[in-house]
Image (cartoon, helix red, strand yellow):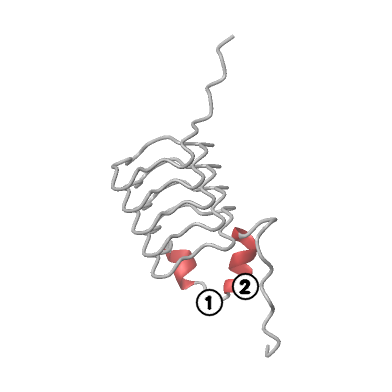
Amino acid sequence: MPEKPRRIDWRGADLRGTNLQGIDLEGADLRAVDLRAVNMSGANLRYADLRGANIEQANFQRANLYGAKMQGVEAKQADFRGADLRQANLGGAYLDGALMPTPVAENRDFEKLLEGYAKAGAPEQEKDKSR
């Protein structure tokens, strides 16, 4: 019987500016990794753990981030256009200037949208009582 592949563990690594286009990092442990200005376009990051990572100005176009743990990521000006962010947990993420997938950018009901993205462990959002 073939041996189960080991989980990639790059916790705390400095990968700034690296070209990782199309890489398969499904389920990888990328906590607190410095991914500033990294090219991850088309990468498979399904169920990856990116909690606390710095992904400022990183390119995640068409990346698969389904179910990724992204709580507390620094994602200022990151590019997620065309990315699959379904079931990703973005609780506490800093997304100033980030380019989000079109359905996210055009969705005016952000409260409902965040219910789909923020799973258990995300900070509760105070409801707008003026509605």
The residue under the point 45% across, 70% down is 105
Q: Position of residue 124 (x, y in %)?
A: 69, 68
Q: Quadrant of the C terminus?
A: bottom right
Of residues 52 and 24, the one drawn nearer to the viewer in this rendering: 52
Q: Which residue is mark 2?
A: 111
The residue under the point 49% across, 42% down is 30
Foreground mark, 1 or 2, reads 2
Could you say whether the residue bearing mark 1 is in a helix, strand or loop?
loop
Q: Which mark, residue 77?
A: none
Q: Quadrant of the N terminus?
A: top right
Identified by mark 2, the residue type is Glu
The residue under the point 41% across, 54% down is 55
Q: Position of residue 91 (x, y in %)?
A: 59, 61
Identified by mark 1, the residue type is Arg
Q: Give the vertical position of 72 relative to 5 (above or below).
A: below
Q: Mark 1–mark 2 contact, CB under 8 Å?
A: no
Q: Position of residue 2 (x, y in %)?
A: 55, 12
Q: Determine which quarter of the picture holds residue 98.
A: bottom left
How many numbered discs, if any? 2
Q: Residues within 10 Å of mark 2 (few under 14, many from 20)?
A: few
Does 34 sit left or right of 127 as displayed?
left
Q: CA distance from mark 1 to mark 2?
A: 9 Å
Of residues 12 and 77, the one drawn nearer to the viewer in this rendering: 12
Q: Which mark, residue 108?
A: 1
Q: Give the vertical position of 110 relative to 24 (above or below).
A: below
Does 88 sit left or right of 97 as displayed?
right
Could you say whether the residue bearing mark 2 is in a helix, strand or loop?
helix
Of residues 25 and 54, the one drawn nearer to the viewer in this rendering: 54
Of residues 78 and 107, the one drawn nearer to the viewer in this rendering: 78
